[in-house]
Amino acid sequence: MVPIQENAMTAQLKRNFVEMNIRMTKNEALEEANRCLYCYDAPCIKACPTSIPIPNFIKKIASGNIKGSAMTIMEANPIGASCARVCPTEELCEGACVLNASTKPIKIGHLQRYATDWAMDSDVELFKQGQSNGLKIAIVGSGPAGLSAARELSRFGYSVTIFEAEAKAGGLGNYGIVSFRLPNNVVDWEIEQVIKLGVDIKTNTRVGVDISADDILARYDSVILAVGMGSVPKLGIEGEDLAGVHDAIEFVKQTKIGSLTEEIVGKRVAVIGAGNTAIDGATCAVRLGAEQVEILYRRTEKEMTAYKFEYEFAKQDGVGFKWLTAPKRVIGDETGKVVGLECVKMQLGEPGVDGRQRPEEVKGSEFVMELDAIIKAIGQTRFIQLIEAFGLQHTNGVVDIDETTMQTSNKKVFACGDVVFGNGQGEAMVVTAAQQGKDAAYIIHERLRKPSEIA
Ligand code: SF4
């Protein structure tokens, strides 16, 4: 393995889970806001999955109305503070900014963070609970989709209960996105906004264990399933249950709750997979003190699924990449601890049914990497048992929905977020999940309103 080149930046990165991006100063925010052309029919709005009125919130920053700016953002996106940090803005709003053609795009993400940070620091009340309409909604899962749906439904006057299996609410935000991109205090603030609207979040409550799906279906007027995805699936190779082989989802979660130590990770780490979760696992390992971190992928750089900015970020952290490389066998010592990984070189063959070239082993190309830890990041499993407990039709764990109504095979149950992502349905972005949560809330409201109230 190639050791990470030690320099001032990597030395600083190690053991450092503090947020990376620096907040704009007031002057920087004003200067940037004043560059905006406040376009008519602004393409940046169209590129935002939650349709934040971007020129509008930027203009409010320019005129000193920061509360108004934060309200504009949070009205359109109930997790607008998180999205200011985790959205791939260069592929969305900033990528669509007209100024790309002449100078450089407006730093929309930074301005969004500036306004929402102000709201967090000021502890202002942004929204009010609606007058009770006597109807009850259950939401399973408190991640981006669940929180967004809850916020909107509560403003409409529904009594909303969220069932959350973890000890804390927030889902992906509090457990799945690395702290140096999204600190927990930001997610906690967004959760608090929802709780202040009267939403009851029952944490440590597993549907199917602490309450049954049938109970929920019987007690609530409508149900939203927003449970996201599960753990990393098995590699299916010898030795993968040895100590020192980590599931990337669990690995990142442990860094978020602070229970991982340098000793657990060791100095030499291989990450299997090349999506955004693999990048998260690799960059967390660097911050935990690993000196040699390499990502192994059975295809090439061209086919990797990680965002370009995530790829660049990993390279800046000193993470290495072994393309066309697949794991064959995890090697352990006499104590049952990982000491190596046997790999094999691959080549791309004929396209499969999905149109992608199939990776094939190059015979006789096996080699061994000496390692202290392995992080598996080859996708995520689905909560099939839970989906079936509600009696919902699904395709390989992806809940089947009517894309216009978010309705599942049970007319009372709607689904949104990662639980409907996959098999060509939707896009696995936090901001998309937030919009789907809003959509589910609006559709439920439309369906449950009394006929006399429908215009
Ligand atoms: Fe401002 Fe760019 Fe949006 Fe135009 S496209 S309103 S310049 S941020």
Image (cartoon, helix red, strand yellow):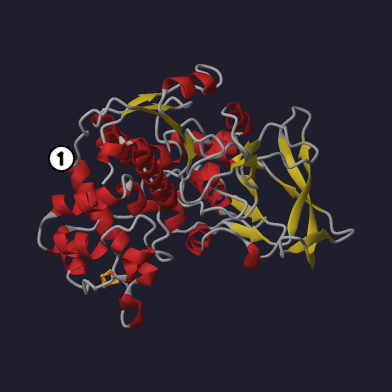
In the image, residue 184 above or below residue 272: above
Q: Position of residue 229 (x, y in %)?
A: 56, 39
Q: Residue furthest top?
A: 210
Q: What's the residue at 30%, 40% (across, down)? A: 152
Q: Position of residue 135 (x, y in %)?
A: 32, 27
Q: Residue furthest bottom?
A: 102
User: Number of numbered discs present?
Assistant: 1
Locate residue 122 relative to residue 165 in the image: left or right.
Answer: left
Q: Nearer the viewer, residue 218 or 426?
A: 218
Is residue 203 found left or right of 243 in the rendered image? left
Task: Name which residue type carries label 1.
Answer: Val
Left or right: residue 373 compared with residue 80: right
Decide if residue 140 is in sight here: yes
Residue at image position (43%, 52%) is 432
Label 1 belongs to which residue? 124
Q: Residue at x 43, y 57 (%)?
A: 9
* Residue 173 shows in this picture: no
Where ligand 1 lies, by quadrant?
A: bottom left
- Above or below for 437 versus 161: below
Above-or-below relation of 78 to 317: above
